[in-house]
Image (cartoon, rainbow, N blue to C red):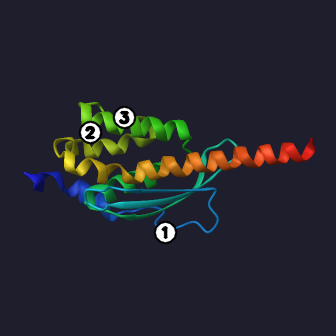
Amino acid sequence: MIDELYSARILKLAANLPHAGRLSAPDGTGERVARLCGSKAVVDVTLDHDGRVSAFAQDVKACALGQAAAGVLGEAVIGASAEEIATARDQMTAMLKAGGYGPTGRFEGLRALKQVADYPARHASTMVAIEATLDAVRQAMAREQADRRTRLAGVA
């Protein structure tokens, strides 16, 4: 039964990890670990002046499902806003836990992992990359806001 989970499509997605590695000077970094299996994602991002992802790198050590999710994410994340990433994360969670339809828009490819819903022990590994990405973007946004406050305080 679990062999069906690792379809040719999932294995193909897992083998293609766009933007693998780390950025030399990220605006934000996020890290997530799935406690049950040890799958881990470290994500670096830089944001453009509109708060959208302009550069992205990921170091993912996960099972095929986590790698597949990271592969889809890496293909779609450049240009995404924090809101789009958060919505995709929420839609992915609903798909896995509540029978939801799955992500739409730029992250629609994550629907390929819909069958993971039947394997709760695999949910966390499937989510590590998107959670780490959202953490990295939020960190970058917080850093930018802090820098802006510091600049404004220096002017006053």
| Distance between mark 1 and mark 2 Cα atoms | 28 Å
At label 3, which amino acid type do we have? Gln
The answer to whether 106 is drawn above or below residue 45 in the figure is above
Q: Position of residue 72 (x, y in %)?
A: 38, 51
The residue where tag 2 is placed is 96
Q: Secondary structure at mark 1?
A: loop
Identify the residue at image location x=67%, y=50%: 143
Q: Earlier in the sequence, mark 1 or mark 2?
A: 1
In the picture, the disc for residue 21 is: 1
Identify the residue at image location x=58%, y=66%: 23
In screen coordinates, is 111 left or right of 42? left
Identify the residue at image location x=42%, y=49%: 130
Q: Earlier in the sequence, mark 3 or mark 2?
A: 3
Q: In the image as oriented, which residue stretches furthest toward the right?
A: 156
Q: Secondary structure at mark 2?
A: helix
| Distance between mark 3 and mark 1 Cα atoms | 27 Å
At label 2, which amino acid type do we have? Leu
Of the pair 30 and 80, the residue shown nearer to us: 30
| Distance between mark 3 and mark 2 Cα atoms | 9 Å
| Rendered image quadrant of residue 25 | bottom right
Q: Position of residue 153 (x, y in %)?
A: 86, 44
Q: Position of residue 24 (x, y in %)?
A: 61, 69
Q: Position of residue 48 (x, y in %)?
A: 67, 48
Mark 2, Cα crowd under 10 Å, few <14 / some 14-19 / many 20+, is many
In screen coordinates, is 143 left or right of 128? right
The answer to whether 10 is drawn above or below residue 20 in the figure is above
Q: Are marks 3 and 1 in contact (CB under 8 Å)?
A: no
